[in-house]
């Protein structure tokens, strides 16, 4: 997700006079939601993702790096829901990333439910 896409979402929210939103996303839509939360944290009341966790910017699976010097943390309350046999565990290093808590370096207010 690019900064331009996040700006477009913000434009729609402004047009509808919506100051904060709860973002809910499933599978690879989670990456769209996560980037919006990074670019516009002030617009996020909370974020819920299903199936795909917050992906480290510049990780091999994430093809959209953030601008240099941009914060890499989503400080909003976050909930990630997935199955213990979910496909995302087939991605290299994902099991360790989630289960050893590294994901909380990027989303400190994250709760994970399996």
Image (spheres, grey):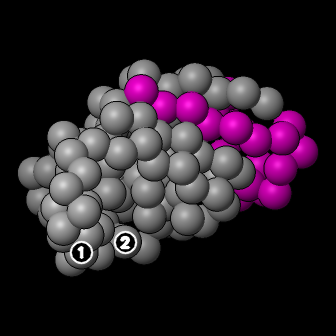
Number of the label disc, if any, that sits on residue 8: 1
User: Residue under circle 2?
Assistant: 1
**In the image, farthest residue toward the left:** 69
Number of the label disc, if any, that sits on residue 21: none
- Quarter holding the N terminus? bottom left
Residue 74 image offset from top left, x and y in percent: 33, 38
- The answer to whether residue 107 is above or below residue 8 is above
Give the Cα distance between marks 2 and 1. Answer: 11 Å
| Residue sitting nearer the eye, 54 or 97 | 54
Q: Which residues are magenta?
A: 77-99
- The answer to whether residue 35 is above or below residue 85 is below
- Is residue 6 at least partly visible in the picture? no
Residue 52 image offset from top left, x and y in percent: 64, 52
At 64% from the left and 57% from the top, the residue drawn is 26
For the residues labelled 2 and 1, say whether their Cβ atoms are less than 8 Å apart: no
Element at label 2: loop
Element at label 1: helix
């Amino acid at each position: 997700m690019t900064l331009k896409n996040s700006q477009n979402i913000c434009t729609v929210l402004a047009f509808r006079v919506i100051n904060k939103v709860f973002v809910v996303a499933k599978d690879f839509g989670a990456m769209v939601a996560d980037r919006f939360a990074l670019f516009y944290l002030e617009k996020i009341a909370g974020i819920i993702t299903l199936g795909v966790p917050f992906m480290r910017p510049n990780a091999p699976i994430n093809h959209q790096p953030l601008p240099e010097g941009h914060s890499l943390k989503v400080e909003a309350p976050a909930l990630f829901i997935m199955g213990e046999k979910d496909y995302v565990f087939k991605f290299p290093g994902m099991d360790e990333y989630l289960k050893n808590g590294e994901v909380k370096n990027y989303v400190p207010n994250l709760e994970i439910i399996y």
